[in-house]
Image (cartoon, helix red, strand yellow):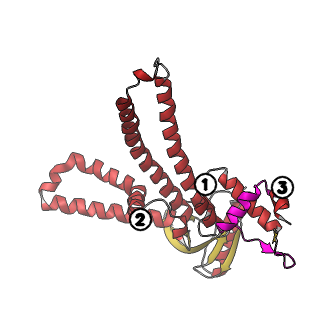
Amino acid sequence: MNTKQAQQLSGVSADNIRFYEKQGLLSPLRNPDNDYRDYSPEDIRTLKRIRALRMLDMPLPQIKAVLTNQLPLSAALQAQRQRLEEQSLHLEQAIRLCGKLATLPGLEELDVDALLSQMDAPERAEGFFQGWLNDYRQVALAEREKRFTFLPDGPVTTPREFSEALFQYAQENGLELTITKEGMYPQFTIDGVEYTAQRSYTAVRGFPVASIACEVLHPGDFEPQDLSPLRRRIQRLLHFLWLPSLLFLLFLLPRRELLNTWEGRLLLLSLLTLTAVLSFRSWLLFYNENGKTRRK
């Protein structure tokens, strides 16, 4: 189909269609008879996807990364949500200031210096804390997408039992799972995302119970792309260690005298080591247990 037909079917203007092609988001074939563009049904679907994501104000580089499978859609949407929330803060501040300024009788009464200071200072303070909160939310969501665990109903001692446990879990949670490599360390896909799994055993009331941990093969695809590596590491430490750190501090504060003796320091070091080991064990066996989102 030609450009006019593609425009009618996709709802994207001809100028934007040609612009998206120049940006590498679209590559229609050419008619060998006249060298005109010949858009396929898949091109129309791509244009509709671009149009939908542009309606969310998603930048074109991110849309291109999503279309070329360089960035998962979920990660792109998380990043875009953060941008929209930051924009919302700026808009809320502007709306409040408009209400205040509307009471002024005229331009002569406007204190420009005070206005600029008021606009700048609250934005920095609110933006800093809100920014860290949004960053933490992004990292927490990404971590929960990268890894999840579940407890199978039966033993998992052979590759076949491992595959059956994965299929049963997928069926119970409405997931589209395809096994690409069988074994005791199988590989599989869920909705097109590649995962690998491993089995561990833990004791429950003295009985061994299998726990299966599933982790994405390419965790970098789920990292928030607009955060620096250092900021991601800090937020990841906060995500995994805030509770053990809080419990340790609550234990330490009433007993600060323990730091005055080497026996006390040794005891605190042992408790800190035990807390770290138990936290790692909990992460390995039970992190995000049954946490994959049910697909509609």
Task: Name the kind of residue labelled 3 in the image.
Answer: Gln
Three-letter amino acid code at the position of disc 1: Met
Nearer the observer, 81 or 28: 28
Residue 40, x across and y down, in percent: 82, 69
Boundaries of the magenta span = 9-35
Which quadrant of the rendered structure holds the N terminus?
bottom right
Numbered disc 1: secondary structure: loop
- Indicate whether 198 appears above or below 50: below
| Number of other residues with Cα within 10 Å of mark 1, as a class: few under 14, some 14 to 19, many 20 or more | many
The residue positioned 69% from the left and 58% from the top of the image is 50
| Residue that appears at 44% across and 44% down | 130
Q: Is residue 6 visible?
A: yes
Residue picked out by circle 3: 8
Q: Secondary structure at mark 2?
A: helix
Image location of residue 244, percent across then percent down: 36, 55
Could you say which is closer to the camera, residue 283 or residue 178?
178
Tell which tag, 2 or 1, sits nearer the viewer.
1
Label 2 or label 1, whichever comes before in sequence order: 1
Task: Indicate yes or no whether the magenta region holds residue 165.
Answer: no
| Quarter where residue 107 is shown | top left
Q: Residues within 10 Å of mark 2 (few under 14, many from 20)?
A: few
Describe residue 282's horizontal placement relative to residue 84 as left or right: left
| Residue 30 in the image: above or below residue 267 | below
Residue 58 image label: 1
Element assignment for label 3: helix
Q: Give the image location of residue 185, x and y in percent.
A: 57, 79
Q: Which mark is residue 50?
A: none
Residue identifier under label 2? 229
